[in-house]
């Protein structure tokens, strides 16, 4: 420990692959957000504008393609690039709102269950188990069958399916951190419960919950695509990546670009989010911080 | 239970524990039905502590010594008995009065690594008790924290750093500074040096003695070996399977132990001189301590006692003062 006592702040560290991946992830997400906001300015066409004369045009680099439709057109002559650009909005809105709703609800349930304990905890956790055991897609289909299919319904259905993971994670962390000596120390010196929760327990939640939220975001983007693909999500004439993949599958053999470009959009979104998640985990973890600190000391000494 | 222990020190008692029991009901593994089991972690323990005194509480793992310490601090559920602190019954204290009690009673932890929040600076850790009790404003807290850090022998700039910058011994000093911040009268030290290197132990023990002399603290010093306790205790209590089997003045207990368990413990302490060590008579204990769940009648030590008799298996021996300020719970000393 003698080297550690030099007391250098463990702030700076070497540029690592993980950080590069994080920059890529962050870049992809920034691009996504910008695209969603600026969709009307960026898209060359109205995504719903039908033009039968220009149907099934290939992407620009193939024979018959032109810069007028860089990603080609679909079976109704709609511009694929414009549809991918507008589809970003649905994915982002669905992803962010589902994670926000499910994350906040699940975190509150988990915190209360972990803190109150006893019968309440047992009851809530049995409910979570039953809910997890029930097929999520089936429940979503049931909910959408009762309500009308729309973006709002998709958000509601996916939120109802998504909060349990948060509740479980948060409850487990609360239970394990409550047993930590420094949390007991806080109670012994006379901290009131809110202070114990917010100052000593909550910081331990930030990292895993953030990481989970980011991963859940990726899952929700996929789930929205799946629901739209099945025809119970976003309804035409609105656009969504999943909807376009669904519509394009009939033309898979003669117009592969209909499924490829929205599919790639989904892939890159999920990839970017995952890069960011693995980096967040490291940044928030004090043990990883210690390792980084030790490395920086070792580097300086050598 | 047996007032003999209290008699002499009744005039100046800081802490008075009478017949204290902590029983934990165990959840049965069966879905329904099944017998109800109860773990007797602490069973009818009585002890007292005078101001400025150190009571060493010794026992092996699972003997209930930590639970007893936690029960006195009102952090373990008390099943029976009373805890009096400065004459006030604190057995059923809760809420705000219990929180205020924390100012007078503090805990030093065994693990100096896990007992400090890694996300807080040392000055925030040491200053937190002052903050939550609203004792001083920010500037005053800063000043008191740096005085506390000096008091426990840490460099003045230690406050600006995070716990991970410190060694185990230094961290234990930080923990001590936090416990001292409220100027408590009683510190319960739960094996404060057993996680430390042997070379560091003496430093921390000496610091604790030094602080006692300067601040007039009382310690309930929990340990699992007799050598550490011998150095700083005025009185020693030996715990076995949730009960105190022997309690008395340090010299009396160490030089003329009366309980077979204490004798076995003392025999297990190595002697630094190899010549003596080689020829020493030792009767190591065999077997395991009994399960605290649903204990059998009779003496808890009966299953391992080399001198066991029939009466030991039938009736629990009471803790009786056999010599001045030295009590033992054993039928053989009748």
Image: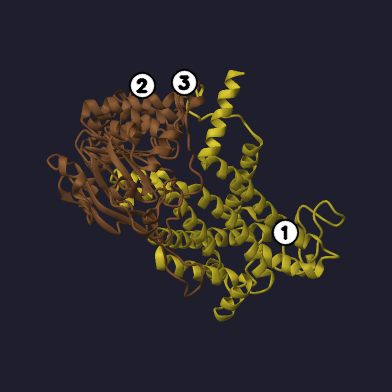
Query: Mark 3 sits on what residue?
Result: B273
Q: Which chain is brown?
A: B
Are the residues under marks 3 and 2 on the same chain?
yes
Is A186 positioned to the left or the right of B305 in the image? left
Upstream in sequence: badge 3 or badge 2: 2
Numbered disc in front, either 1 or 2: 2
Numbered disc 1: secondary structure: helix
Whether residue A49 appears in this view of the structure is no
Query: Mark 2 sits on what residue?
Result: B155
Whether residue A111 appears in this view of the structure is yes
Q: Residues within 10 Å of mark 2 (few under 14, many from 20)?
A: few
Give the quadrant of residue A238: bottom right
Looking at the image, which residue sits at the far top?
A: A302
Question: Real-space Cα distance between discs 1 and 2?
Answer: 60 Å
Residue drawn at x 59%, y 59% as measured from the top left:
A89
**Chain of the residue under the numbered disc 2 shown in the image:** B
Query: Mark 1 sits on what residue?
Result: A263
CB under 8 Å between discs 3 and 1: no
The percent coordinates of residue A285 (x first, y second) are 52, 41
Is B182 positioned to the left or the right of A27 in the image? left
**Chain of the residue under the numbered disc 3 shown in the image:** B
**Chain of the residue under the numbered disc 1 shown in the image:** A
Numbered disc 2: secondary structure: loop
Question: Real-space Cα distance between discs 3 and 1?
Answer: 79 Å
Numbered disc in front, either 3 or 1: 3
């Amino acid at each position: 420990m003698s080297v550690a006592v030099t007391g250098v702040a463990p702030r700076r560290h070497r540029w690592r692959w993980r950080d590069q991946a994080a920059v890529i992830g962050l870049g992809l997400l920034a691009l996504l957000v910008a695209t969603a906001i600026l969709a009307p300015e960026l898209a060359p066409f109205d995504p719903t504008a039908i033009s039968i004369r220009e149907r099934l045009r290939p992407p620009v680099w193939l024979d018959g393609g032109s810069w007028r439709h860089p990603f080609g057109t679909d079976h109704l002559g709609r511009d694929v690039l414009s549809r991918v650009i507008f589809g970003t909005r649905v994915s982002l809105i669905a992803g962010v709102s589902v994670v926000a709703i499910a994350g906040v609800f699940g975190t509150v349930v988990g915190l209360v269950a972990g803190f109150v304990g006893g019968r309440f905890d047992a009851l809530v956790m049995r409910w979570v188990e039953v809910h997890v055991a029930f097929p999520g897609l089936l429940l979503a289909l049931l909910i959408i069958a009762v309500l009308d299919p729309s973006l709002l319904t998709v958000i509601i259905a996916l939120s109802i399916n998504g909060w349990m993971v948060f509740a479980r994670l948060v409850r487990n962390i609360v239970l394990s951190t409550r047993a930590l000596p420094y949390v007991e120390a806080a109670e012994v010196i006379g901290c009131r419960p809110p202070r114990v929760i917010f100052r000593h327990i909550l910081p331990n939640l930030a990292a895993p919950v953030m990481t989970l939220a980011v991963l859940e975001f990726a899952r929700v983007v996929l789930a929205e695509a799946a629901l739209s693909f099945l025809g119970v999500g976003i309804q035409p004439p609105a656009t969504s990546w999943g909807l376009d993949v669904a519509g394009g599958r009939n033309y898979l053999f003669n117009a592969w670009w209909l499924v490829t470009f929205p599919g790639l959009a989904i892939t890159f979104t999920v990839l970017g989010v995952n890069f960011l998640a693995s980096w967040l985990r490291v940044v928030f973890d004090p043990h990883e911080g210690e390792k980084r600190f030790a490395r920086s000391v070792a580097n300086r000494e050598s | 239970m047996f007032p003999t222990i209290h008699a002499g020190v009744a005039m100046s008692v800081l802490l008075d524990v009478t017949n204290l029991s902590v029983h934990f009901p165990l959840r049965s593994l069966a879905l329904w039905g099944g017998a109800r089991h109860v773990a007797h972690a602490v069973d009818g323990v009585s002890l007292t502590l005078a101001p400025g005194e150190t009571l060493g509480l010794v026992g092996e793992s699972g003997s209930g010594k930590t639970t007893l310490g936690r029960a006195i601090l009102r952090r373990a559920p008390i099943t029976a008995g009373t805890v009096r602190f400065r004459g006030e019954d604190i057995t059923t204290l809760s809420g705000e009065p219990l929180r205020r009690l924390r100012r007078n009673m503090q805990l030093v932890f065994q693990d100096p690594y896990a007992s400090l929040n890694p996300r807080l600076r040392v000055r925030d850790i040491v200053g937190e008790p002052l903050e939550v009790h609203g004792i001083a404003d920010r500037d005053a807290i800063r000043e008191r924290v740096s005085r506390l850090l000096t008091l426990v022998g840490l460099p003045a700039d230690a406050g600006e750093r995070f716990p991970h910058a410190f060694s185990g011994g230094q961290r234990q000093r930080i923990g001590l500074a936090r416990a001292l911040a409220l100027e408590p009268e009683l510190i319960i030290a739960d094996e404060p040096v057993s996680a430390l290197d042997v070379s560091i132990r003496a430093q921390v023990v000496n610091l604790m003695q030094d602080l006692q002399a300067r601040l007039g603290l009382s310690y309930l010093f929990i340990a699992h070996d007799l050598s550490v306790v011998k150095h700083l205790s005025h009185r020693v209590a030996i715990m076995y399977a949730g009960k105190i089997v022997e309690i008395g003045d340090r010299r009396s207990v160490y030089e003329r132990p009366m309980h077979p368990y204490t004798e076995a413990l003392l025999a297990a302490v190595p002697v630094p001189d190899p010549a003596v060590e080689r020829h020493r008579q030792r009767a190591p204990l065999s077997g395991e301590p009994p399960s605290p769940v649903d204990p059998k009648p009779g003496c808890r030590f009966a299953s391992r006692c080399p001198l066991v008799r029939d009466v030991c298996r039938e009736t629990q021996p009471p803790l009786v003062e056999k010599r001045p300020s030295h009590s033992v719970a054993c039928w053989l000393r009748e």
